[in-house]
Image (spheres, rainbow, N blue to C red):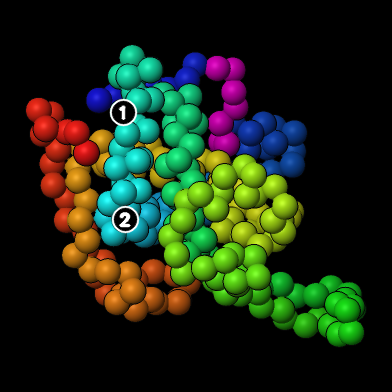
């Protein structure tokens, strides 16, 4: 199975940075720092998020089967070729990833220093205050998310998203400081998870409810999170 790139006149991230340097807006060390940040954050966070998503799919066999069927149908309609367009058509897999990021956001907390006095209803936050925002708790707030502990990808159906508060879901932060690589991260996770689900049945060994979480730089399991991978035989791939 091969992944086919799309031939379009599009600038990659590095091209844009080099273009800015030619305008005198950046120097070589600035570009190096941006690329280092992009690669490090992309590798570490997406790897972690994929582990949680695969573990959740292993625990929910019905959802795993639905994802596998979506992948097979998309491949059949696309000449058995993995393309960016195919990945964009995997809408149910995308909802699964988004729901996994809701339950286990890699960046579980952010902090900001208030630059000027900020009034929130009856409360006044003075300038210079370091405010911490708990994304993990927000993603499990029953005011926004009924039955918040349940893994339900259909929370991200278009009609469900429409009236939801825009800041109730922040896996990539939000506003001017949001993650610049969120679209790349989503495509990367969809590409890898799609290939895994296409070729393997997943079964849980460790259950997430029993796994302790480490809240250091990012949210991750503090111990092993094991999943059993069983190769799918082409002659018996009906589920």
At numbered mark 1, what does the secondary structure look like: helix, strand or loop?
helix
The residue identified by callout 2 is 60
Q: Residues within 10 Å of mark 2 (few under 14, many from 20)?
A: some
Quadrant in the picture for the N terminus: top left
Between residue 83 and residue 63, name the one nearer to us.
63
Which residue is found at the position 56% from the left and 49% from the top? Answer: 156
Q: For residue 232: magenta? A: no
Q: Is residue 198 visible?
A: yes
Rendered-image quadrant of the C terminus: top left
Query: Above or below — where is 23 with respect to 185?
Result: above
Majority secondary structure of the magenta segment? loop
Q: Which of the two residues, 64 or 138, is positioned nearer the viewer here?
A: 64
Q: Is residue 120 left or right of residue 217?
A: right
In the displayed structure image, the side of residue 229 where residue 183 appears, left or right: right
Identity of the residue drawn at 62% across and 49% down? 160
Determine the residue positioned at 11% across, 32% down. Answer: 236
Q: Marks 1 and 2, how far apart in space?
A: 19 Å
Q: Is residue 219 left or right of residue 119?
A: left
Of residues 208 and 219, the one nearer the viewer is: 208
**Residue 211 coordinates in the image, percent (x, y):** 31, 75
In the image, is residue 237 above or below residue 45?
above
Residue 227: % across, % down:
21, 59
The disc at residue 72 is 1
Q: Earlier in the sequence, mark 1 or mark 2?
A: 2
Which residues make up the magenta segment?
8-14
Residue 31 appears in the picture as rendered: no
Q: Position of residue 204 (x, y in %)?
A: 22, 61
């Amino acid at each position: 199975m091969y992944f086919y790139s799309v031939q379009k006149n599009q600038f990659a991230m590095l091209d844009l940075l080099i273009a800015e340097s030619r305008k005198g807006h950046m120097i070589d060390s600035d570009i190096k720092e941006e690329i280092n940040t992009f690669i490090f954050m992309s590798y570490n966070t997406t790897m972690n998020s994929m582990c949680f998503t695969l573990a959740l799919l292993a625990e929910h066999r019905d959802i795993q089967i639905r994802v596998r069927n979506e992948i097979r149908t998309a491949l059949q309609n696309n000449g058995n070729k993995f393309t960016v367009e195919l990945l964009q058509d995997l809408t149910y897999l995308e909802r699964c990833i988004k729901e996994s990021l809701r339950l286990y956001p890699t960046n579980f907390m952010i902090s900001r220093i208030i630059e000027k006095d900020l009034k929130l209803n009856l409360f006044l936050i003075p300038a210079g205050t370091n405010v911490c925002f708990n994304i993990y708790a927000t993603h499990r707030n029953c005011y926004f998310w009924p039955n918040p502990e349940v893994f339900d990808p259909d929370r991200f159906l278009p009609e469900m998203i429409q009236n939801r508060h825009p800041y109730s879901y922040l896996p990539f932060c939000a506003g001017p400081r949001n993650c610049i690589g969120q679209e790349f991260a989503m495509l990367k996770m969809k590409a890898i998870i799609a290939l895994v689900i296409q070729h393997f049945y997943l079964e849980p060994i460790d259950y997430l409810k029993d796994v302790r979480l480490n809240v250091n730089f990012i949210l991750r399991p503090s111990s092993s999170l094991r999943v059993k991978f069983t190769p799918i035989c082409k002659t018996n791939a009906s589920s």
